[in-house]
Image: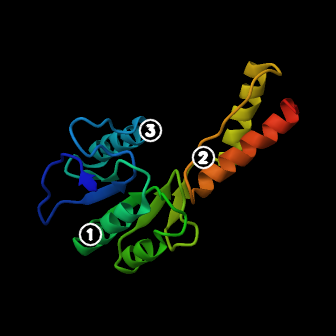
């Protein structure tokens, strides 16, 4: 289930930009993802500097699932909004919806997790291999040659695979046991 955060109601003259991510609370008892909440707040703060009348919406599911993200892109394209920023729960699944938004004249950018095969305008995010490498280097230091490491991830997440590959590379280099 996908929910929209509490926000001011837009009229036809308002500029409206939407962020779509997982980690969005679905009930009053859920907690927002700390990372994505910070991104949302950053968008709201930036909009206030540019024009206090700009409305920023946050859409998306709590769980890692591309289907509600696709549905949200399609709903926002149909309204339409002035721009969409989306993190992709699946590197390829969002491509048709992103492409439809672009063709409808709605700028779309990916952040954190990319859809490189789409027509999105750009990607803003971390060099995930390097981030994983640094984490693996630090883990090897902390473990000092002792212990085991488990990695948990999500399916079809190219950005997480890159991070895992960097992590494994650093462990092989700094803790080759």
**Helix, strand, or loop for circle 2?**
loop
Which badge, 3 or 1, comes first in the chain's sequence? 3
Cα separation, mark 2 vs mark 1, equals 28 Å
**Residue sitting at 88 percent across and 31 percent down?**
177
Q: Quadrant of residue 75?
A: bottom left
**Helix, strand, or loop for circle 1?**
helix
Residue 146 appears at what percent x and percent y? Answer: 79, 20
Residue 106 appears at what percent x and percent y? Answer: 35, 71
Q: Quadrant of residue 144?
A: top right
Position of 108 compared to 41: left or right?
A: right
Cα separation, mark 3 vs mark 2, equals 13 Å
Residues at badges 3 and 2 in contact (C-beta under 8 Å)?
A: no
Residues at badges 2 and 1 in contact (C-beta under 8 Å)?
A: no
Of residues 86 and 175, the one drawn nearer to the viewer in this rendering: 175
Q: Which residue matches tag 1?
A: 75
**Residue sitting at 28 percent across and 67 percent down?**
76
Q: Which residue matches tag 2?
A: 126
Q: Badge 3: how crowded within 10 Å, few (<14), some, or many (20+)? A: few
Q: Quadrant of residue 39?
A: top left
């Amino acid at each position: 289930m996908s929910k929209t955060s509490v926000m001011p109601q837009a009229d036809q003259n308002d500029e409206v930009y939407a962020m779509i991510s997982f980690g969005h609370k679905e009930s009053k008892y859920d907690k927002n993802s700390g990372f994505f909440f910070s991104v949302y707040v950053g968008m709201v703060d930036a909009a206030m500097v540019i024009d206090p009348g700009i409305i920023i919406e946050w859409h998306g599911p709590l769980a890692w699932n591309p289907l509600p993200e696709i549905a949200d892109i399609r709903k926002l394209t149909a309204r339409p909004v002035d721009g969409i920023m989306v993190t992709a729960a699946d590197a390829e699944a969002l491509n048709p919806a992103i492409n439809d938004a672009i063709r409808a004249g709605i700028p779309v950018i990916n952040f954190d997790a990319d859809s490189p095969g789409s027509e999105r305008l750009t990607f803003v995010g971390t060099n995930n291999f390097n981030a994983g490498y640094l984490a693996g280097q630090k883990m090897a230091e902390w473990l000092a040659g002792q212990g085991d490491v488990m990695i948990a991830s999500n399916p079809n997440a190219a950005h997480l695979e890159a991070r895992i590959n960097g992590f494994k590379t650093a462990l092989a280099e700094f803790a080759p046991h």
